[in-house]
Amino acid sequence: MSKQIIKPFELLLEYEKRSVSHALGTAEEETDLGDWSGIGFKIGDTHLVSEVDEVNEVVILPELVKIPGIDNWVLGLVNIRSNLIPAIDLRSYLTGESAKLTKHSRMLVINQPGGQAGLVVDEVFGQRHFKQSQWEDVEGENDSRIYSYCDKFFSHDDVVWNVFDMDQLVQDARFQNASIK
């Protein structure tokens, strides 16, 4: 019985060859990613995706400082790298039902007039890629306020990803005025 002798240098060359071929990929693989990228997240049972440029970062929800005299959809203030920003329960703002904070809950940090805001969501799925040719228009009336910020959606692997417009959200007068009336 003969044993094959593995030469370390040849083994390293083989690893390099595999690594380079994997990193380069093929042009076909690159086009499969799609031409539209977004950050996928979930509110209740609804899958949403917002354009990558609309989300600055995704963080685990830091410690909250409560603020009196504001709507219940504002959870409080959080400190993100020495910047105090409001933490918004996006589920409560959109549906009236408070989010159940779990180990999957995350905060999407977005820009808004005058600074940033943190949108607390049930779960974040990371970056998603779609082809703009797969966009479909949201049709009909839907009772949920979520869809007032969505006019397009993608359907991929039996999941409907509604395109959530963060710019439209931060320009909404209701979103900008969280004081209790």
Image (tube, rainbow, N blue to C red):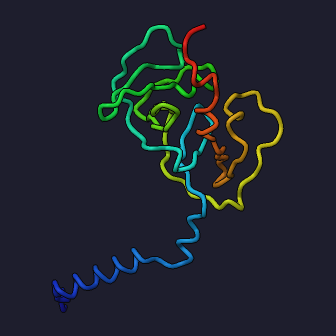
Q: Is residue 20 above or below residue 70?
A: below
**Which quarter of the image is occupied by the C terminus?**
top right
Q: Position of residue 158 (x, y in %)?
A: 67, 51
Q: How many marks?
A: 0
The residue lying furthest to the front in this view is: 114
Q: Is residue 169 left or right of residue 14?
A: right
**Residue 51 % position (x, y):** 57, 49
**In the image, is 129 to the left or to the right of 58?**
right
Q: In the rendered view, would you say 31 is above or below 163?
A: below
Residue 48 point in image, percent of width and height: 60, 42
- The answer to whether 115 is drawn above or below residue 36 in the figure is above
Residue at x 62%, y 19% (from the top left corner): 96
Compared across the picture, whether 60 is left or right of 119 comes to: left
Is residue 66 or residue 4 the one in the foreground? 66
Residue 137: x and y in percent read 77, 48
Residue farthest to the right? 140
Residue at the (45%, 44%) spot, across then down: 56
Residue 28, located in which quarter of the rendered image?
bottom right
Quarter of the picture containing the N terminus is: bottom left
